[in-house]
Image: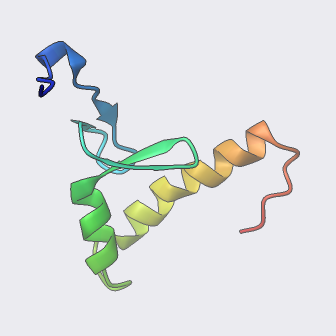
Amino acid sequence: MSHLLKKEDVQLNDCLICYSAKERGIHVIGSFICEECERKMVQMNVEDQSYSLIVNRLGKIRDRLRQEGNGEVQS
């Protein structure tokens, strides 16, 4: 017997990078990154215009770890 998901059963998460609510992606240390942003990050070069934006937003993970822990997170 198959289980059909109802619309209200679908869990949306806010992406750390694009801030969009998405259903599919990865969770990294308590933060969600949607599949589209994950794909862009994997294919990105440091010369890309959005590289620094993504690095900055990924820094939020480090910042949260510092707040939750004892502040000894290495960059």
The quarter of the displayed image where residue 20 is located: top left
Residue 31, above or below 58: above
Residue at left 49%, top 43%?
A: 31
Instruction: Provide residue 43's location: percent of width, then percent of height.
Output: 27, 79
Residue 40 is at least partly visible in this image: yes
Residue 16, above or below 54: above
Residue 50 is at least partly visible in this image: no
Q: Coloring scheme of the render? A: rainbow
In this picture, residue 13 sits left or right of residue 1: right
Foreground residue, 22 or 60?
22
Residue at left 31%, top 62%?
A: 38
Q: Quadrant of the N terminus?
A: top left
Residue at left 55%, top 41%?
A: 30
Instruction: Provide residue 42's location: percent of width, then percent of height.
Output: 32, 75
Q: How many marks?
A: 0
The quarter of the displayed image where residue 32 is located: top left
Residue at left 77%, top 66%?
A: 74
- Point out the residue furthest to the front here: 1
